[in-house]
């Protein structure tokens, strides 16, 4: 398996996202001192191919600094050079000039366009709505609340309350308008209506008997979502029958930190794990991972599929390493 890599010295990776507009671009959110103290850096990285067809390492187009650790990043769905980050100081930052032209001309602004601050603790998850919610940002914080923001306003639209512990992840459904899910260290999976200004969950279920750190939605079946916990389990849920999970995968004795359902295959799923691995699953082929990648030497925290290139995956971790690659099992299947 050939990987393109980039090392962020003294910065530890938390999240990365491919651009929805440009196949070669991705953003990497990092923190100093593993996010425990110090600042954060946002890197705009690019994939490049040489004239002889070889794939060199990722190149760094620009780097932006923030005074606290950066824990998540999301591209704007309607402006190709704009993105938002989530920080340890409880604020969101919206940045511009995130493209090669601005970076090469050193025209990328060093300060964010806007800083949104209402959360009282770290923001660990950020999602920028698409389709029906394209103008809205969703933040999930360790202050046990979620907030919905209009990116054109300084103050949040709604604060959602329903978790009793730290919230690690929240995601809009890509196929159902105004629906989003959140998971927390209280073990709960909550479903919410973004138009319910009372800010109470539609449904709350005990997803795991331990902390839940990750969730994601299927890109193909509007009823399916997945959760990952510190128990090493990945569970699938069907909105039509939420009394119990519809499938369960065992990812090892350490926590599942992030999940990513493939936008290219309805049965393919990737997990980033605290056992330093990234695992590739195919639900058509049973309950064992099809591939276990051991490219990291620390917690793997960030994970994303490239929407433009079939089965291309990126991951990042606390070892300061970001990788872009196509898993062998998907190449061998003729899927890529």
Image: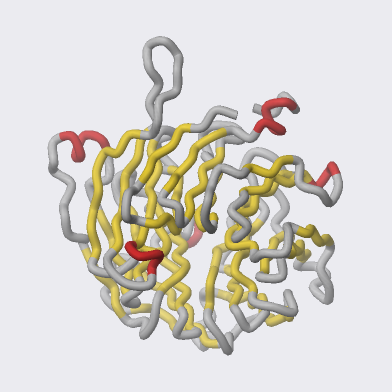
Residue at the farthest top position: 52
Q: Residue at x 24, y 63 (%)?
A: 66
Name the spot of residue 131 as percent of width and height, x first.
50, 54
Q: Which residue is drawn at 38% across and 68% down?
A: 35
Q: Which residue is drawn at 70% across and 28% down?
A: 335
Q: Is residue 173 left or right of residue 314?
A: right
In this rendering, the answer to whether 84 lies above or below 3 is below
* Residue 155 quadrant: bottom left
Query: How many marks overall?
Result: 0
Name the spot of residue 214 as percent of width and height, x first.
60, 65
In this rendering, the answer to whether 62 lies above or below 144 is above
* Residue 121 quadrant: bottom left
Q: In this view, does 212 lie to the left or right of 5?
A: right
Name the spot of residue 38 as percent of width and height, x first.
28, 69
Residue at the farthest front position: 297
Query: Which quadrant, please, contains the N terminus?
Result: top right
* Colour convention: secondary structure
Q: Residue at x 71, y 44 (%)?
A: 268
In this rendering, the answer to whether 333 lies above or below 209 is above
Q: Is residue 275 left or right of residue 54?
A: right
Query: Which quadrant, please, contains the C terminus?
Result: top right
Q: Is residue 280 left or right of residue 77?
A: right
Name the spot of residue 210 as percent of width and height, x first.
69, 78
């Amino acid at each position: 398996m050939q990987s393109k890599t980039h090392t962020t010295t003294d910065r530890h990776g938390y999240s990365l996202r491919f651009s929805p507009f440009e196949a070669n671009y991705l953003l990497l959110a990092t923190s100093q001192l593993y996010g425990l103290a110090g600042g954060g850096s946002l890197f705009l990285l690019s994939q490049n191919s040489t004239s002889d067809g070889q794939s060199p390492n990722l190149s760094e187009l620009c780097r932006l600094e923030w005074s606290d650790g950066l824990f998540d990043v999301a591209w704007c769905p309607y402006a190709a050079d704009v993105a938002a980050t989530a920080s340890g100081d409880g604020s969101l930052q919206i940045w511009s000039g995130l493209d090669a032209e601005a970076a090469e001309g050193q025209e990328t602004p060093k300060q964010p366009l806007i800083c949104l601050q209402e959360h009282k603790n770290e923001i660990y998850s950020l999602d920028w709505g698409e389709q029906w919610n394209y103008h809205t940002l969703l933040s999930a914080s360790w202050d046990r609340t979620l907030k919905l923001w209009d990116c054109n306003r300084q103050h949040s639209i709604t604060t959602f309350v329903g978790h009793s512990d730290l919230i690690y992840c929240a995601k809009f459904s890509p196929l159902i308008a105004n629906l989003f899910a959140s998971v927390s260290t209280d073990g709960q999976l909550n479903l919410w209506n973004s138009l319910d200004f009372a800010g109470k969950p539609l449904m709350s279920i005990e997803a795991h008997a331990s902390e839940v750190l990750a969730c994601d939605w299927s890109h193909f079946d509007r009823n399916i979502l997945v959760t990952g916990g510190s128990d090493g389990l990945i569970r699938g849920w069907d909105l039509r029958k939420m009394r119990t999970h519809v499938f369960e995968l065992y990812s090892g004795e350490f926590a599942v930190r992030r999940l990513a359902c493939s936008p290219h295959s309805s049965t393919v799923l990737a997990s980033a794990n605290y056992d330093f691995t990234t695992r590739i699953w195919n639900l058509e082929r049973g309950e064992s991972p099809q591939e276990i990648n051991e490219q990291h030497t620390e917690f793997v925290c960030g994970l994303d599929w490239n929407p433009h290139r079939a089965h291309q995956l990126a991951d990042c971790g606390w070892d300061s390493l970001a990788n872009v690659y196509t898993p062998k099992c998907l190449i061998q299947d003729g899927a890529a």
